Amino acid sequence: MIRGEYVSKHRGVSEERDLGPIFMELFGGSPYLLAEDIHDPENPIKRFKLSRLSDVSVEKKPYTPPEKSDCERFLSSFAGVGGDEAKIEHIQIWGSPKMAEHFEE
């Protein structure tokens, strides 16, 4: 179990969190921690952007991570938004002609 201060992008405030780490992943070019938020039993498994986590300490409380099947919604989601039922409706990328050459490859 770890404890740290986390600044939520949506709330903009720093909150102390007790987290049960599951694994780290690179998502959209940024490192994230997939973890169980101990204080939110209704929505316990979340992604936490590492750059928003500070003052981290390792707690001596034992922690057993959830089964992989409990994490499937996050593992199969597109960019962590919408879960596995979400459908991509439209993607538009603006760029230079040089950038377009890379997409053609």
Image (cartoon, grey):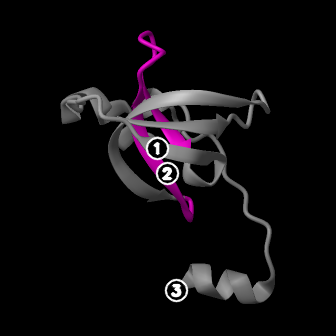
| Label 1 packing within 10 angstroms: few (<14), some (14-19), many (20+) | few
Q: Secondary structure at mark 2?
A: strand
Using residue 36 as the reference point, say whether residue 60 is left or right of it: left
Residue closest to the eye, 99 or 71: 71
- Please give the name of the residue rendered at 53% of the width and 41% of the height, measured from the top-left corner: 48
Q: Nearer the viewer, residue 65 or 27?
A: 65
Q: Are marks 3 and 1 in contact (CB under 8 Å)?
A: no
Using the rendered image of the protein, determine whether residue 79 is visible from the camera's viewpoint. no
| The disc label shown at residue 105, or none | 3
Image x and y of residue 78, in percent: 49, 44
Residue 97 pos. (x, y %): 78, 86
* Cα separation between marks 3 and 1: 45 Å
Q: Which residue position is annotated with label 1?
A: 57
Is 1 on the left or on the right of 37, as rendered? left
Q: Secondary structure at mark 1?
A: strand
Q: Residue furthest top?
A: 42
Residue at the (56%, 41%) spot, across then down: 88
Badge 3 density bin: few <14, some 14–19, many ≥20, Cα 10 Å: few
Give coordinates of residue 56: x percent, y percent.
Answer: 52, 45
Above or below — where is 66 with respect to 78? above
| Residue 25 % position (x, y) | 41, 56
- Residue drawn at (45%, 47%) of the image: 33
**What's the amino acid at mark 3?**
Glu
The magenta span reads: 28-48
Q: CA distance from mark 1 to mark 2?
A: 17 Å
Q: Earlier in the sequence, mark 3 or mark 2?
A: 2
Residue occupied by mark 2: 32
